[in-house]
Amino acid sequence: MRVLILGGDGYLGWPTAMDLSSAGHDVVVVDNYLRRRIAEATDSDALMVAPSLSERAQIFKGVSGHEIDVRIGDLSDSDIIFGIVRAFMPDTIVHYAEQPSAPYSMRGFSEARETFQNNLDVTFNCIWAVKELAPDCQIVKLGTMGEYGTPDIDIEEGWIDIEHKGRKDRFLYPRAAGSLYHTTKVLDTDLLWFYVRTYGIRVTDLMQGPVYGISTEGADLDEKLCPNFHYDDIFGTLVNRFLVQAVAGIPLTVYGQGGQTRGYLNLRDTLQCVRLATENPADAGELRIFNQLTETFCVNEVADRIKAVGDSIGLDVSIQPIQNPRKEKEEHYYNPVHSGLIDLGLEPTYMTDDVIAAMLERVISNKERIVTRRIMPRVRWN
């Protein structure tokens, strides 16, 4: 298949490019380095230094024999994406090209506007490029479990059947995002659904939980192929932050009561899910939604697991609750359905002690790169 990856420089985008290329697909990646620029501007650089996309592609070809075609361009410019789609005519577009940080989106007006404009413009341009130029192309869009919020009923897989006053209908599951970033993802879903039902495009929307991990088959070929592993308060996901704090000797920063429960996913499983969605496309006129997670934990459970493994290898890890910088429920019901990807063939990688230990060892080998001032929360909206 011809696969176009939007946001191919990201924590998920680059490993996805290597995975799909290794699987025999013809891969083109596009990025404008927005995340790198934001990370530099906010003193939030990744733990391991990542070469440019072109350098990564050259290294990957040298160690694997597989090619990845790199384009640098701003996808919020419709001429850029229309030109690439017209020339490449992809079978699938994997859309990661959004500002991915909730804290950054809540930092101030300019950051909020940048998040809003970039995320909605890129999604809108992607939809129209498919509609006008490649109507059989599937869009595989990265959504987020954060779209749903924390309702007091089970979270169905994208859709919910409602009976009201003796009549029944099927609706998108109600959304209740907790940040502007997550709100842009809700708007993405609404845009996609409108164009699916109006023009018959085909879309798979992946509602992904927080991702953790460093290792993938591609990244393990050469240390310079490592994903953008962030541990700061802007881009670092919970598990990745806690891993670095454990190694740096900083108490694990549990926000508030620590009962916030989410569905987590190993980076290797993200690659499985995206490949399954790519190779088993949605039907024309279908918005197919999968909840992309493998297991649920509250913050306290994640902290306890990392502490236990860290202590077992001599790190002497401590846990310290701090005031929650976010506006969110700290104790709540949370039960998301997530059977769709399992049915397609997902083989989960669970957060075992061995998996945690391997991640800690990788962080330990880069301990000298940890900048401790990047760890504590610098953005508050509570």
Image (cartoon, rainbow, N blue to C red):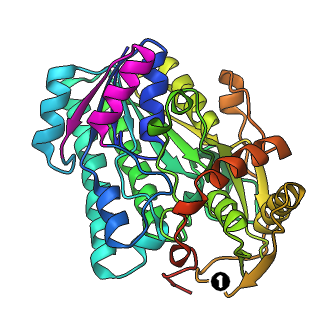
Magenta stretch holds residue 68: yes
Which element carries disc 1, helix, strand or loop? loop
Is 252 on the left-hand or right-hand side of 39?
A: right
Residue visible at 29% across and 56% down? Answer: 34
Is 230 on the left-hand or right-hand side of 244?
A: left
Q: Is residue 175 visible?
A: no
Q: Which residue is mark 1?
A: 324
Q: Quadrant of the N terminus?
A: top left
Residue visible at 18% across and 38% down? Answer: 81
Asked if residue 223 is positioned above or below residue 278 in the image, the reply reads below
Asked if residue 297 is positioned above or below residue 75 in the image, the reply reads below
Residue visible at 47% across and 32% down? Answer: 16
Residue 127 percent coordinates (x, y)? 28, 39
Foreground of the two, 373 or 323: 373
Foreground of the two, 355 or 110: 355
Residue visible at 52% across and 61% down? Answer: 369
Magenta stretch holds residue 214: no
Residue 124 percent coordinates (x, y)? 26, 47
In the picture, residue 246 is in which quadrant?
Answer: bottom right
Is 242 on the left-hand or right-hand side of 45?
A: right
Is 178 on the left-hand or right-hand side of 198?
A: right
**Label 1 neighbourhood size at 10 Å, few (<14), some (14-19), many (20+)?**
some
Foreground of the two, 373 or 174: 373
Residue 161 percent coordinates (x, y)? 66, 46
Asked if residue 36 is positioned above or below residue 197 in the image, the reply reads below
Which portion, as a residue range, is magenta?
52-73
Q: Quadrant of the C terminus?
A: bottom right
Q: Amino acid at mark 1?
A: Asn
